[in-house]
Amino acid sequence: MGGGGSALRVCADHRGGINWLSLSPDGQRLLTGSEDGTARLWSTADGQCCALLQGHESYVTFCQLEDEAAFTCSADCTIRRWDVLTGQCLQVYRGHTSIVNRLKTLHPQKLFNPGQDERVVLPYLLPRPLPTAPGELLWGCWRDPSGASKLGPCCRILVANNQLFSSSYDRTARVWSVDKGQMSQEFRGHRNCMLTLAYSAPWDLPSTPCVEEAAAGGLLVTGSTDGTAKVWQVASGCCHQTLRGHTGAVLCLVLDTPSHTAFTGSTDATIRAWDILSGEQLRVFREHQGSVICLELVNRLVYSGSADRTVKCWLADTGECVRTFTAHRRNVSALKYHAGTLFTGSGDACARAFDAQSGELRRVFRGHTFIINCIQVHGQVLYTASHDGALRLWDVRGLRGAPRPPPPTRSLSRLFSNKVGCAAAPLQPA
């Protein structure tokens, strides 16, 4: 059993749970989005809050941080762009509508297999805490201490190639001009909520004539509670492929651009690999006993966090499970690989550090009181964001992980920025 981690700082400025945490590509700032309707910018040099972003009329469901701008989406059906230096709102993107706003609107069978009584954590997708016990969700809906239940209408955004992509509970995905704030394309075809998305730029795709014409603006991949993923032609808005095979909701998605392969995780307890050009299902990863909640793709290895309280490591090219990481007492809600160490966040309110090569548990980080929704690593500091409203900073020095492998090929298909670097001024334990 790993020893306890040392807390460097506890940042409790938010007055509600933190739903998402994003690290800027240059590693200088963090962005948190909260149930209190605000987002906050933090310096990685000293852990201090450097800007408060106010303007949303409901809770912030997701956020992404770039070097010069911050992006937030909210249950008020808008997306906002902010200046990271002044905290000023630069643009409001309007157009998404909400068709799912309460638990009764989203019937359990829409998310899960009939007859499957499974409590599952959807940390960054469906934010609201605690129907039964800390870190548990019932049918994908949080309940806060007052007893209120709610689902967010706009769940994911990503910024790539000067375009803003968004997916929503209104069954659509959209692409916007970052600077002008105008919607340039809308993607319709899913029969239920869109939960996750990834983008492959035109220069990442083959240069054959048939592909060049179809993917002139790149390809957008979306996952939905209707059990399918879809590949869209960004330039035309047409559906390029529909990826059918899952028997439950698609909760998470990662894209390997060099091989044009999408990996999807589902409430059917499987991960599936797909060729996004042909739509062919390449392989199925079967060993989890519960919903697959989060995925991380690193150097041809797929890491999956599940409601069965485990993380598994798979060979991306064969689907073989080569390692299982245990010790979690509830669902695994977040994953982050960094320098030979696999960090996990769980519904048991703990973060953990495992040796990625051996699977050995190296350290447990205790202090949060509710589910950990997101984690990031920068230099020698681990950042954990929880539904208890706190951002915690942990000292990760001394973790004897495997030697750092070569960095993966840079891709614009990331779901959020996962670049890491050296801290300019490492914090010291309190």
Image: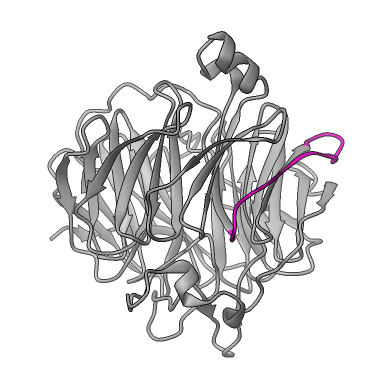
* Quadrant including the N terminus: bottom left
Q: Quadrant of residue 402?
A: top left
Residue 401 on image: x %, y % = 21, 38
Is 410 a magenta residue?
no
Residue 247 on image: x %, y % = 37, 58
* Quadrant including the C terminus: bottom left
Q: Quadrant of residue 201?
A: top right
Magenta-colored span: 177-193
Seen in the image, is 196 located left or right of residue 335?
right
Above or below, 184 against 156 in this view is above
Above or below, 229 against 283 in this view is below
Point 58% across, 9% down: residue: 209
Seen in the image, is 207 located left or right of residue 306?
right
Q: Which of these two is toward me, 52 or 10?
A: 52
Q: Is residue 182 visible?
A: yes
Above or below, 184 against 271 in this view is above
Q: How many marks?
A: 0
Above or below, 400 against 171 in this view is above
Point 39% across, 79% down: residue: 134
Point 56% across, 17% down: residue: 211
Is 180 a magenta residue?
yes
Residue 181 on image: x %, y % = 84, 41
Q: Which of these two is toward me, 360 or 188?
A: 188
Point 27% across, 44% down: residue: 284
Seen in the image, is 130 located left or right of residue 91?
left
Q: Is residue 46 visible?
A: no
Find the residue positioned furthest to the bottom: 146
Q: Which of these two is toward me, 267 or 299?
A: 267
Residue 417 on image: x %, y % = 53, 38
